[in-house]
Amino acid sequence: MKNLKYIIYREGDYYVSQCLNMEIASFGSTIDEALANLKEAVELYLEDEQAINNFHEVSEFMLGEFAIHA
């Protein structure tokens, strides 16, 4: 069993969910739907036995925000 870290953020009318351990993302109309869709996407991805090689541990992470002049 592997513990996965994820982030969910709002983009327009949807919530986007991204797995931090693998390059997998999904979305939904609600936070719960976005998370459920992400779990399903990860499970489908891991059906490929070689996909587990793309898993990397994420022990700590920081979420932040900063501004730039562009």
Image (cartoon, rainbow, N blue to C red):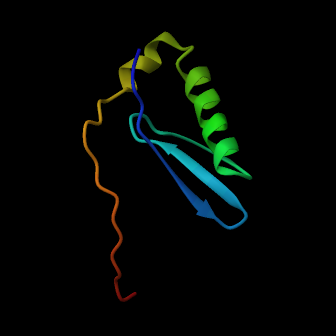
The quadrant in which the C terminus is found is bottom left
| The quadrant where residue 67 appears | bottom left
Residue at the (66%, 43%) spot, across then down: 32
Residue at the (60%, 52%) spot, across then down: 16
Residue at the (56%, 47%) spot, across then down: 17
Residue 57 sits above or below residue 29 on the image? above
Q: Residue furthest front?
A: 32
Residue 39 sits above or below residue 65 on the image? above
Q: Residue 25 placed where, x, y %? A: 56, 42
Q: Residue furthest top?
A: 49
Q: Residue furthest left?
A: 60
Q: Is residue 52 left or right of residue 64?
A: right
Residue at the (34%, 83%) spot, across then down: 68
Q: Is residue 35 left or right of residue 3?
A: right
Exactly how many numbered labels are in the figure? 0
Residue 34 sits above or below residue 11 on the image? above
The quadrant in which the N terminus is found is top left
| The quadrant where residue 47 appears | top right
Q: Residue 46 placed where, x, y %? A: 52, 18
